[in-house]
Amino acid sequence: MAWLWRAGAKLSLVASAVGGGATAALIATSDDPEMALKLFATVPHRLFRGAATAANIAFDYEYSLRGFPEGSSERERIKHEVHLRSAQKLQDLCFKNGGVYIKLGQHLGQLEYLVPEEYVQTMRESMLNRCPVSSYEQVCNVFKKELGDTPDKIFSEFDPVPIASASLAQVHVARTHDGQKVAVKVLVQHTHMTDTAAADHATVELVVNTLHRFFPSFDYRWLIDEISESLPKELDFLTEAKNSERCVENFHKLSPHIANYVYAPNVYWNLSTSKLLTMEFMDGAYVNDVKTIRKLGINLHELSTLVSQTFAEMMFKHGFVHCDPHAANLLVRPLPSSKASIWGRRKPQLILLDHGLYKELDFQTRTNYASLWKALVFADANAIKEYSTKLGAGEDLYALFAGVLTMRPWNRVVDPSMDHLVIQGNESDRLELQMYASQYFHQISELLRRLPRVILLMLKTNDCLRAVNNSLLQGSSLETFFVIGKVSSEAVIEAKMLQSKSLLTWLNIKLDKILLEVRLWGMQVALWLLQLRKSLSWYNQAL
């Protein structure tokens, strides 16, 4: 055990040295010495806390599992307890340090079946709903710096108690002087977030790299690279506002058939800055609030299909993708222009919130990704291998890549039956997926290392959407994969049409399109028959 204690001590000392050096340099060059002194008092402590937590977790695993043979039931029982303890320690660290750490915790909470379930559940249950809240005084300070006055002067009404608090900001309800109800997102210095971001990034990187050194299978260094690129964009609300408007514009230009069903709040540009974002206030139910959604008269299957289609259009046709679609960022309301059916049903409208994290897919990547999903839905093994390899998985890990995307083992991925990708959400499915992830954990880590970061963000988006579908339907559905197959196939055809250079090529593409439409029509008929059979079965049971 001595080596582990020494490693933990060394990690803590290095973290403190990094923090001390960085903050000393900050004081020497800062235009705000008072702020710099505060950072000097807080940054090393935050660094030390992160390093100490990492050392504590590492020691717990090494000490607790020592002496238990791999694969034994006793080792598995102990490992479960250590996973749970370690997840709670990591959760405490995230809440104490805030900012970047909460972003990391939220991301871990969406890596279902890629990290132990104990981490996923612990982070998912806490990170979306229990983020730290800054004081009204801190909010006022931001307003004074950004707009020159306090909220009560700028708005006719301003609720000092936030209705939501995320990792980087919090949201308050207000009313403009002309009576419009608005949501005001404030980048409050929770723990001087923008000032400590660089130091936090350094210590998180140190912790992850150190854990990887002692536990090679723990390789999430790619996540640090992604955070370092995306965080500056998320700290600029003007970028978020522009993303929001571009997203809506893409639907109207490129996907007009569902444009009315997808909405983003309007931005009040005159009341927005890089640290303040004033938007139209939206009434709606969170996408995982099944009870309220049903009360609104919205069909859960129809909503699930809309969510899938919305993000399929972004990924395969727009190439501009909202990469943080967890439940707290998706609202649903009845489509304003629709009327209730005789059964009381209303069409859903999906409201997209938090547009800070977007990713652009270049034409080639977008086309390859669409081609891969088309192959997955239609169980085309050769095409799966071809496009997985083109996206970076390599010829040795293409089957694993397909499994990570679909959460299905290879034999199910290439099964020609219609429901080969459907997950029912039952205990058997859950255990199968956990066993699959555990068996190939080392290969999954290697795959994540190989894939381009843009594809890693698509994996995160898939994880988020899978969690949303699971909350709505307790699994996935045939309708979901029919939509994904349809949109990805249409995107592939469109890409081929853009690249066609001869009449013969154009005619071949047209023929492919006709054959595709016939195949999709056959799938649609099969879906209708399946739904009819389910309805008749339900009716017979009711009798």
Image: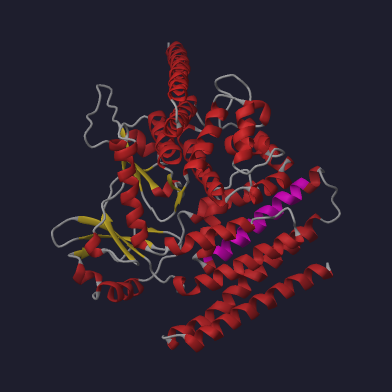
- Left or right of 376, for residue 136: left
Q: Quadrant of residue 155?
A: bottom left
Q: Is residue 434 visible?
A: yes
Is 301 in front, or is 446? Answer: 446
Q: Quick check: is 90 in the magenta stretch?
A: yes
The answer to whether residue 102 shows anywhere in this view is no
Q: Is residue 248 above or below residue 304?
A: below
Quick one: which residue is furthest to the left in this view?
178
Residue closer to the observer: 422 or 57: 422
Percent across and percent down for residue 542 are 43, 14
Residue found 75% across the figure and 64% down from its top: 59
The residue depicted at 71 percent of the width and 60 percent of the height is: 212
Q: Quadrant of the N terminus?
A: bottom right
Report x, y in % for residue 334. Answer: 28, 36
| Prevalent SS, magenta region | helix
Name the spot of residue 251 as percent of width and height, x first. 33, 40
How does the figure colour the protein chain or chains? secondary structure
Q: Observer-nearest residue: 73 or 345?
A: 345
